[in-house]
Image (tube, helix red, strand yellow):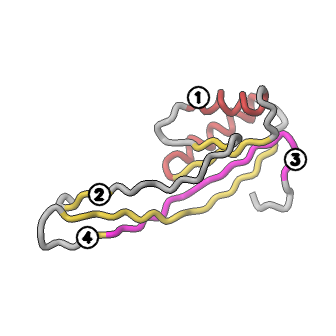
Amino acid sequence: MDRYQKVEKPREEAPINENEIRITAQGRMRNYISYATSLLQENGSNKIVLKAMGRAINKTVLIVELIKRRIVGLHQNTVIGSTDITDTWEPLEEGLLPLETTRHVSVINITLSKQELDKSAVG
């Protein structure tokens, strides 16, 4: 792959809801925890949704457990899945063809709520 360069594509991101937190691998856990706690306690939100992909999943689960210890009586619903991400690589030398690679990335959505959530949901 040293003869190829990755093509950066503009991301098509959906707008983030007020009660939605997207966790990244680079973000600080303390900031996520304080923001989520303030949403639930000070802003009067009844539920928040934490979303993560790939390497940030471990951090998200740890953040949720710490939030549940700080705010007693929260209900949790977890949805796991995967998504396909296609990367395009263009050649740096003549005679090579452009490449497309597809990778499967795990996704997790954790909903924390003050009120009881749907009991028929799998998570």
Pointer 3: residues within 10 angstroms few (<14), some, or many (20+)?
A: few
Q: Which residue is mark 4?
A: 98
Cα distance in 3D space between marks 4 and 2: 10 Å
Secondary structure beneath label 1 = helix
Whether residues under marks 1 and 3 lie with C-beta atoms below 8 angstroms apart, the answer is: no
Q: Tell whether 72 sits left or right of 84.
A: right
Residue 70 position (above or below residue 119): above
The residue segment tinted magenta is 100-117
Q: Earlier in the sequence, mark 2 or mark 3?
A: 2
Q: Which residue is mark 1?
A: 31
Secondary structure beneath label 3 = loop
Magenta: main secondary structure: strand
Picture quarter with the N terminus: bottom left
Q: Nearer the viewer, mark 4 or mark 3?
A: 4
User: Residue at the left extreme?
Assistant: 94
Q: Nearer the viewer, mark 4 or mark 1?
A: 4
Picture quarter with the C terminus: bottom right
Residue drawn 13% across the image and 73% down it: 95
Q: Earlier in the sequence, mark 4 or mark 2?
A: 2
Pointer 1: residues within 10 angstroms few (<14), some, or many (20+)?
A: few
Q: Which mark is residue 116?
A: 3
In the foreground, 69 or 92: 92
Q: Earlier in the sequence, mark 2 or mark 1?
A: 2
Cα distance in 3D space between marks 4 and 3: 51 Å
Which quadrant would residue 94 be assigned to in this image?
A: bottom left
Q: Position of residue 42 (x, y in %)?
A: 77, 26
Residue 122 position (above or below residue 110): below
Query: Given the image, on which type of amino acid does mark 1 rest?
Result: Asn
Query: Given the image, on which type of amino acid does mark 3 rest?
Result: Glu
Residue 90 position (above or below residue 18): below
